[in-house]
Amino acid sequence: MPEIVVKFENKVIERVVSEKKRISIGRTHDNDIVLDNRGVSRKHAQIEFNDNAAVIIDNESLNGTFINNRKISEEVLRDGDTITIGKYSLDYHTEVTHVPSNSSMDGTMVLKTKKQKEMLQRDKVDREIVSRMGGSVLVGEENTDFSEYRIERNITTIGKAKFVHVHARGFMLSGIQAKIVKENDQCAIVNLGRKGKTKLNGEEIDKHLLKNGDIIQVGKSVYRYVEGQS
């Protein structure tokens, strides 16, 4: 059974588990998930469930709905996706991770927070990159040999060897330190070399599915993953 973990300023305020086929999200109290903030529209978004998938739909809200830092109108949710609505984040899980206790200009204020502006600008830039490059992209952030690299192979290698696809910098890196592997409609980052030299969003990993906006660090080289929009 799916679970939605609602957070405000990184603090969990609610865990929602429901057998309903549709969950509404918004500012007013007649919604299933109430986000009490004027940056949230009265009927901001909804999640529809069927036997195989969950789809989130933005109800033409004033400030928009974001999935993994990308603005969407309608999108199939995947396990671990982060929905951002106003100042709230909602983590979507396909299965319950915690046993719960028993427990338009519709007056919406336009958000002018630094985070909102950054998300909107980043979303605009990322859409331009994906449109121009034609698929998922690594954006060079620090100590990289490129500004943008399209992920078009089933396996993209990263490391210090001359023959790898993406050259990384740093001491004690393996020839092939990591690889990005296409798995169905997603990509995963896999550590192949020295332990601790491949990180995702600051955490050491062995293997992890990538989400839009993830920060990959291999040695001293830092890349941002921009997911091609399906």
Image (cartoon, rainbow, N blue to C red):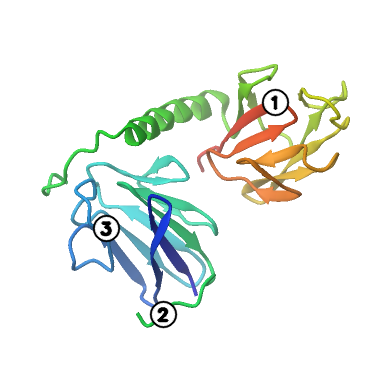
Q: CA distance from mark 2 to mark 3?
A: 20 Å
Q: Residues within 10 Å of mark 2 (few under 14, many from 20)?
A: few
Q: Residue at x 56, y 45 (%)?
A: 211
Q: Earlier in the sequence, mark 2 or mark 3?
A: 3
Residue at image mark 3: 35
Q: Looking at this view, is 21 or 103 the one in front?
A: 103
Q: SS of the residue at dot 1?
A: strand
Q: Looking at this view, is 214 or 19 the one in front?
A: 214
Q: SS of the residue at dot 2?
A: loop
Give the x, y percent position of residue 52. 52, 68
Whether residue 188 appears in this view of the structure is yes
**Quarter residue 48 falls in:** bottom left
Q: CA distance from mark 1 to mark 3?
A: 38 Å
Q: Residues within 10 Å of mark 1 (few under 14, many from 20)?
A: some
Give the x, y percent position of residue 64. 30, 43
Q: Is residue 38 left or right of residue 78?
A: left
Q: SS of the residue at dot 3?
A: loop
Give the x, y percent position of residue 18. 39, 75
Q: Looking at this view, is 1 or 35 the one in front?
A: 35
- Between disc 2 and disc 3, the foreground one is 2
Q: Residue at x 47, y 55 (%)?
A: 76
Q: Which mark is residue 221?
A: 1
- Between disc 1 and disc 2, the foreground one is 2
Q: Which mark is residue 101?
A: 2
Q: Amino acid at mark 1?
A: Ser
Residues at circles 2 and 3 in contact by the CB criterion of under 8 Å: no
Q: Amino acid at mark 2?
A: Ser
Q: Is residue 111 above or below residue 206?
A: above
Q: Earlier in the sequence, mark 1 or mark 3?
A: 3
